[in-house]
Image (cartoon, helix red, strand yellow):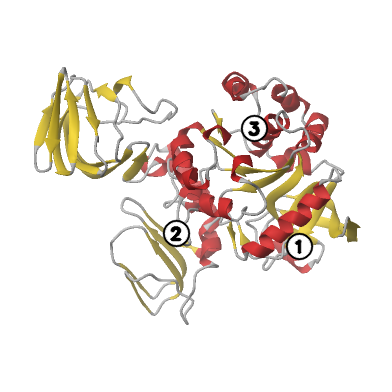
Amino acid sequence: MNYAVILAGGVGSRFWPFSRELEPKQFMKVVGEDSLLQATIQRLRGVVEPARIYIVTNNIYFYEVKAQVAEFGIPDENIILEPRGRNTAPAIGLCARLISRIDKDALLLILPSDHYIKNAVNFRRTLKKALTCAKDDLLVTIGVKPTAASTGYGYIKIRGKAKPEKGVEYFAVEKFLEKPDLNKARKYFKDKHFYWNSGMFIWKAKTFLEEVRKYLPKLHASLERIDSVKDIPKIWPGIEAISVDYGIMEHSKRIALIPADFYWTDLGSWEALTEIFPKDKQGNIAGSNTLSLDSRGVCVFSRGNRLVSAIGIKDTVIADTPDALLVCDRNKTQDVKRLVDKLRSLKRRERRAHLTERRPWGSFTILEKGDFFKIKLIEILPRRRLSLQRHKSRAEHWVVVTGSARVTSGKKIALVRSNQSIYIPQGVKHRLENHTAKPVRIVEVQTGSYLGEDDIERFKDDFKKECRPCA
């Protein structure tokens, strides 16, 4: 049977400031009405049934994934949670181990969750060719013919002419190569034996696990100790991080490549995104809230409601959000990751989250903050509630803007309607609940000596799987 393993645990740091640790790019709507994750699942129709689609992700994304895949009928138990990211080899190995215990002859489609692909019909046809090859115990990869000398992708070098396998032609792979510098990329681009590494793989679960046993014996030994998802938390800390390219694909002798006959980009940088949007005669990408004078090659992307203006600049990416602005030379977009590393070292909040943060129960937006106060807009989804909690260093004043909220404050429970308010003293146990069928919006004013999100003590929480602060 065919199974899909979708890798959805990355943080997409090169896509900052749109992509943040708590809202990475795979969950964003980049093109169209579906997120990149949802589009990945949509493309599998007719190839893999929803009940056999698995998504491997980090603990902190469980409820986001659950919400995004609900329309497809993918079971909750198919969301495989990593306590910490360990790169692609352990993630794929984990799913291969779990699926092979259900179906020893399982064929796996390994797909990243954050790619952009045109022509889904051709994509599915390519997958079916790859599945045919994989039945002969080959590790199959989909290679993309380079359209430029890119330094943002790894490369694959093929050997010899195409070989037939059950009516499907494939190429033997000579070697996998890491992302090159510009000089090497130019050489690869001119040589017909080189393809971009798409990161999409197809193989039997047992064939892959045999290669893991051969080339990553420590990982294989750890996977052998995992009989169900309950074993993951105790085994995972001892597993070393390693990519499937470095750990397996650079060593295996049974790799086949099938060329892609569809448009593909991994959206690995802002420059990659500029390739898929229409441009004006000066090569600019601009939305309705953008003004540009005497500029060329300027690409403006905005998640805010501000007017963005550019005068006399060239070959620049501008990415605007309510709390962070990126201005970057288009030839330097791969270096955004270095900037994010700098933000991490400075412990800047902008690396981790947007001003609006989604939660399993809804979302909150920071409207204003200063010394000893913070103002938030809170939206609670129908039939959801926050944890029963208290704060040591702050009090809260809630004003219901729309809807009706059930509020627990100490031993009292009150129904607070639109245009009414309630005060929660410092140190008092409290809870917000939406008991209705419509969203509730509340303005929260916090006051106190410390207003950090970690000043919270929880007593009851409906969303215990969510590891980040749930509020």
For discs 1 and 3, the disc positioned in front in the rendered view: 3
Q: CA distance from mark 1 to mark 3?
A: 29 Å
Residue at image point 65% right, 58% down: 151
**Which mark is drawn over residue 188?**
1
- Quadrant in the picture for residue 410: top left
Percent x, y of residue 47: 67, 52
Q: For residue 300, what is the image quadrant?
A: bottom left
In the image, residue 2 above or below residue 94? below
Badge nearest the viewer, 2 or 3: 2
Question: Is 251 or 406 nearer to us in this picture?
Answer: 406
Task: Identify the secondary structure beneath mark 1.
Answer: helix
How crowded pointer 1 is (Cα within 10 Å; few <14, some 14-19, many 20+) is rated as: many
What residue did someone put label 2 on? 33
Picture layout, residue 142 above or below residue 410: below
SS of the residue under disc 2? loop
Q: Mark 2 or mark 3: name the one nearer the start of the chain.
A: 2
Depth check: give the residue in front, 315 or 231.
Answer: 231
User: Does residue 349 appear in this view?
Assistant: yes
Label 2 Cα crowd, 10 Å radius (few <14 / some 14-19 / many 20+): few
Specify the label residue 241 is tagged with.
3
Q: Callout 3: 10 Å neighbours few (<14), some, many (20+)?
A: some
